[in-house]
Image (spheres, helix red, strand yellow):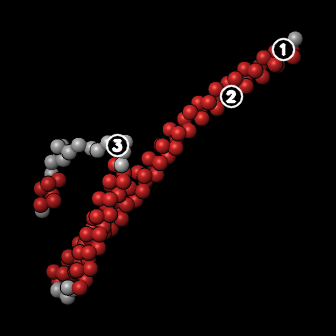
Amino acid sequence: MAIQDGLSDLTHLIIPDLEQPGMIERLYKAFEGQMESMEARLRELVAEAGSAASLADIDKTVKTLASLAKTLGVLIDLKRASDEEAAEEDGDGLASDAEALRAQLADRLGRLCEGGAH
């Protein structure tokens, strides 16, 4: 219930700037901490298994781990997109140069063709 109460009004949250250096790495570290916590909790619950309450806690923890697995998928996609964007930025100069070179070549070929036609 405490989590739901805390999430009921998200308007005060500020979305972090993913362009900020190290933000994706920070998200991975936070994720890793959550995974370690949930794994430790699951080990404790399995060691205490036997009561209905512990089985319910195990089920809840397993569901949380499944949710974290989905989060990992999102983080992987985010990292991939960031890497691709960085590669595109690095290649933008090359792409622009390639376009300029193509335009120059087309212009020269056009002039050659015009000169040969006369």
Q: Nearer the viewer, mark 1 or mark 3?
A: 3
> Considering only vertical position in the picture, is 92 above or below 73?
above
- Residue drawn at x 30%, y 67% as measured from the top left: 35
Q: Give the class, few, some or many, for how many residues have Cα within 10 Å of label 3's Cα (few <14, many ≥20).
A: few
Outermost residue, bottom side: 50
Instruction: Tell me the kind of residue under disc 3.
Output: Gln
Q: Position of residue 41 (x, y in %)?
A: 23, 75
* Mark 1 touches mark 3? (CB < 8 Å): no
- For disc 2, the marked residue is 102
Instruction: Tell me the kind of residue under disc 2.
Output: Arg
Q: Is mark 1 on a helix, strand or loop?
A: helix
Q: Where is residue 77 in the image (x, y as percent from the top left)?
A: 43, 53
Residue 43: image quadrant is bottom left
Which is more N-terminal, label 2 or label 1? 2
- For disc 1, the marked residue is 115
Which is more N-terminal, label 2 or label 3? 3
Instruction: State the residue in front, 1 or 25.
Output: 25
Outermost residue, top side: 118
> Considering only vertical position in the picture, is 53 above or below 18?
below
Instruction: State the residue in front, 51 or 38.
Output: 38
- Residue drawn at x 56%, y 38% as measured from the top left: 91
